[in-house]
Amino acid sequence: MPLRYMLKQFFMPPGILLLLLVLAWFLRRRFPRLAAGCFAVGLSGLWLMSLPVAVEWGARQIESEPALAQQQWAELAQHADVIVILGAGRDSADPAWGGDQPSAMAMERIRYAARLAKASGLPVLATGGLHFGRPPSEAALAAQVMQEDFGVAVRWQEERSRTTWENAVDTAAMLQPEGIRRVLLVTQAWHMPRSRWSFEQAGFEVVTAPVGFIGVPNDRPLGGWLPEGKSFWQSTQLLNELIGSLAYPLAYGL
């Protein structure tokens, strides 16, 4: 996992864009045109990925699954057998909580799943393995928060997975021997298409419950044409999702 993490940080923004700027500096005298190209791509990439309007447009291309209407929540048990929450990382050693906590994105999924569980009566499975091989697992943290903060018990904890594909395969190994094949899948709206595909490939019937839509009006000054740090982070998530959506059918489609 550390090698995979380092390679991802190096070849994904901002790493690759910063590398282009560094290359532009070193190439500026011997290869001025190449240096100018590296500088233009690096700088424009940093700028575009920092624009809320670019995030809004990009997310609209990916967020293809509609949100669940609240009037549907009480009837979800007719269409699914279990709520599955996909892991989304964790924040380490928060002194306010006395230890690790689910990330803000994971908390958004947990909160939404808790609402759905209370409305539908469906049992819950949390996914997510160890963060860099160190316990507790993301699934265990999710189960703790669900119980202590929302009063919802997590029946199953899938604690081995490190990727969306492994979320699906390891969840199938736990649920399908019990005859469970219909899942209500909770994850970010931009992550849902790849997640749904993975769980369908693993043999599930999937009802989608996307949350955290970002392809909505950005409500920023000047229509979102001013750069900001949050938008850059969101852009990296969208880019990672786009790459994953293209790579998964090639890697796992057969």
Image (cartoon, rainbow, N blue to C red):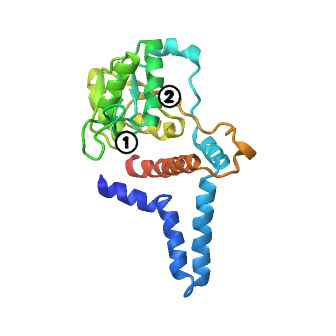
Q: Secondary structure at mark 1?
A: helix
| In the foreground, 226 or 211 | 226
- Whether residue 166 sits left or right of residue 188 in the image: it is left
Position of residue 146 relative to residue 187, above or below, is: above
Question: Residue 38 location in percent, x, y?
Answer: 57, 72
Determine whether label 2 and label 1 are within 8 Å by CB.
no
Q: Which corner quadrant of the image does residue 139 belong to?
A: top left
Q: Is residue 43 visible?
A: yes
Position of residue 177 relative to residue 199, above or below, is: above
Q: Secondary structure at mark 2?
A: strand
Question: Residue 100 location in percent, x, y?
Answer: 32, 36
- Whether residue 198 sits left or right of residue 70 in the image: it is left
Please give the residue where the numbered disc 1 appears in the rendered image.
165
Q: Which corner quadrant of the image does residue 170 belong to?
A: top left
Question: Outermost residue, right direction?
Answer: 222
Q: Bin the neighbour count of mark 2 within 10 Å (Cα to Cα): few under 14, some 14-19, many 20 and up.
A: many
Mark 2–mark 1 Cα distance, whole angstroms, equals: 16 Å
Please give the residue where the numbered disc 2 appears in the rendered image.
208
